[in-house]
Image (cartoon, rainbow, N blue to C red):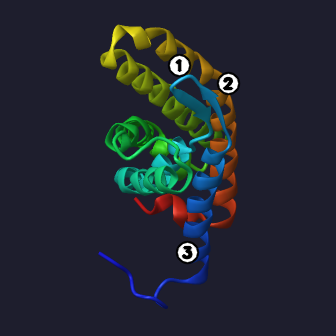
Amino acid sequence: MHISEGVLATPVLVGGAALTAGFFVASLIHVPIGVASVHLVLNGLVGLILGWLSFPAIFVGLLLQSIMFQYGGITALGVNTFNMALPALISYFLFAHLATRTSKSYVSSVSAFMAGSLAIFLSGILVGISLYLTGEAFLPAAKIVVAGHIPVMLIEGIITAACVTFLKKVKPELLSMT
């Protein structure tokens, strides 16, 4: 399904481009840790905004990163997509209503923070499980990857809360697309 040129309003186009660019740029700043890396993902924010559409959005982002920057890889694309998109979807189901549709700013901010943090935590766990299932020799790397995401959880939670607060003020319809 495609929307033709000239149909969408400028704020919708700018919002979509900003989300895509934010996800893409944030994930380019990474710290290699053995066979994986630690970086911002913003999958909690993607989940809050896109819901089920997180899967294709994250797939496209990971595909572009693997082709353009050799992050991840084509053969690991399915696993990487699952490891990032499932936590985005879980965050959507657990926190979207409170984060995006409540009028209480404190509840909204805390819910958005939890969505961002939980998505990274679950992604770290899934990456760790993926490594462990590959072989016990990867268990030390799996533990390092999970531990390395703890500071990222806090940063992602803060960024997600700030983005949701900002979007609720300037473009609330972006938060009610799903």
Q: Is residue 94 visible?
A: yes
Nearest to N terminus: mark 2 or mark 3: 3
Nearest to N terminus: mark 1 or mark 3: 3
Residue at horizontal 43%, vertical 10%?
Answer: 139
Q: CA distance from mark 2 to mark 3?
A: 32 Å
Q: Secondary structure at mark 3?
A: helix
Nearest to N terminus: mark 1 or mark 2: 1
Q: Is residue 97 above or below residue 35?
A: below
Residue at horizontal 61%, vertical 21%?
Answer: 148
Quadrant where the C terminus sits is bottom left
**Where does residue 167 sit, x and y in percent of width and height?**
64, 59
**Where does residue 24 sit, x and y in percent of width and height?**
59, 54
Residue at horizontal 47%, vertical 16%?
Answer: 142
Reading the image, the residue beneath label 3 is 12
Q: Residues within 10 Å of mark 1 (few under 14, many from 20)?
A: many
Amino acid type assigned to the residue bearing label 2 in the image:
Pro
Q: Quadrant of residue 75?
A: top left
Q: Is residue 38 left or right of residue 169?
A: left
Between label 2 and label 3, give the one nearer the viewer: 2
Between label 1 and label 2, give the one nearer the viewer: 1
**Where does residue 47 sit, x and y in percent of width and height?**
46, 47
Amino acid type assigned to the residue bearing label 3 in the image:
Val
Reading the image, the residue beneath label 1 is 146
Mark 3 and mark 2 in contact (Cβ < 8 Å)? no
Q: CA distance from mark 1 to mark 3?
A: 36 Å
Q: Residues within 10 Å of mark 2 (few under 14, many from 20)?
A: few
Between label 1 and label 3, give the one nearer the viewer: 1
Reading the image, the residue beneath label 2 is 151
